[in-house]
Amino acid sequence: MKKLLTLCIIHKDNKVLLGFKKRGFGEGRWNGFGGKVEQGETIEDSILREIKEEAYILPTDLRKRAIFEFTFEGNPEILEVHFFSASEFTGEPQESEEMRPQWFMEDEVPFSDMWPDDIHWFPLFLEGKNFKGKFHFQDHNTILHHTLDILE
């Protein structure tokens, strides 16, 4: 059984905009913005809605960059995450109930306070590559195995 999700990282002038998750899945970690694709919603509509709800901005140059599949030991559900990036947006990033946005320099991304898969694919993202990946977790902190492939 698959669950459709979205994720977007804003990347501009050697900086990335991440959000500190204040509640729910991933609480206490820095992450991009995104979430569940709602019934009747396209993936693109979902990511725009989520970014607006979480950081009060609207990307104007959304680019699809990757598809991830995340699985967890003992759970048959596959989390299919459609990953986007953007560099231009309208509005100013602001804290919401769910996320506290903050800019980080590319070389200061707080990997120790992020999902453990991020350190594997983030360099590809920063290099402008498109890719796909599969990550199988034992728990929320331990990756048992993964694959990453660059897409042409």
Image: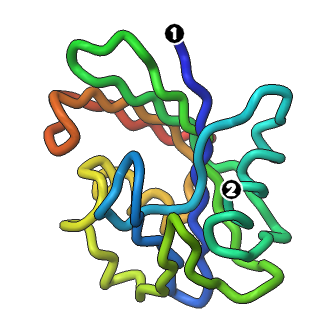
Nearest the eye: 15 or 34: 34
The residue depicted at 47 percent of the width and 84 percent of the height is 102
3D distance between C-alphas at marks 2 and 1: 23 Å
Residue 1 numbered tag? 1
Q: Would you place residue 72 above or below residue 53 in this image? A: above
**In the picture, residue 146 is in which quadrant?**
top left
Q: Position of residue 84 (x, y in %)?
A: 65, 54
Give the crowd class for mark 2: few <14, some 14-19, many >=20 residues within 10 Å.
many
Asked whether, in this view, residue 137 is left or right of residue 107, the answer is: left
Q: Would you place residue 91 above or below residue 5 in this image? A: below
Residue type highlighted by circle 1 = Met
Q: Position of residue 69 (x, y in %)?
A: 45, 28
**In the picture, residue 76 is in which quadrant?**
top left
**In the picture, residue 111 is in which quadrant?**
bottom left
Residue 58 numbered tag? none
Q: Secondary structure at mark 1?
A: loop
Q: Earlier in the sequence, mark 2 or mark 1?
A: 1
Asked whether, in this view, residue 83 is left or right of residue 133, the answer is: right
Residue at the spot of label 2: 50
The residue depicted at 79 percent of the width and 85 percent of the height is 91
Q: Secondary structure at mark 2?
A: helix
The residue depicted at 51 percent of the width and 79 percent of the height is 101
Q: Would you place residue 136 above or below residue 7 in this image? A: above
Q: Position of residue 151 (x, y in %)?
A: 58, 39
Nearest the eye: 5 or 127: 5
Q: Quadrant of the C terminus?
A: top right
Residue type highlighted by circle 2 = Glu
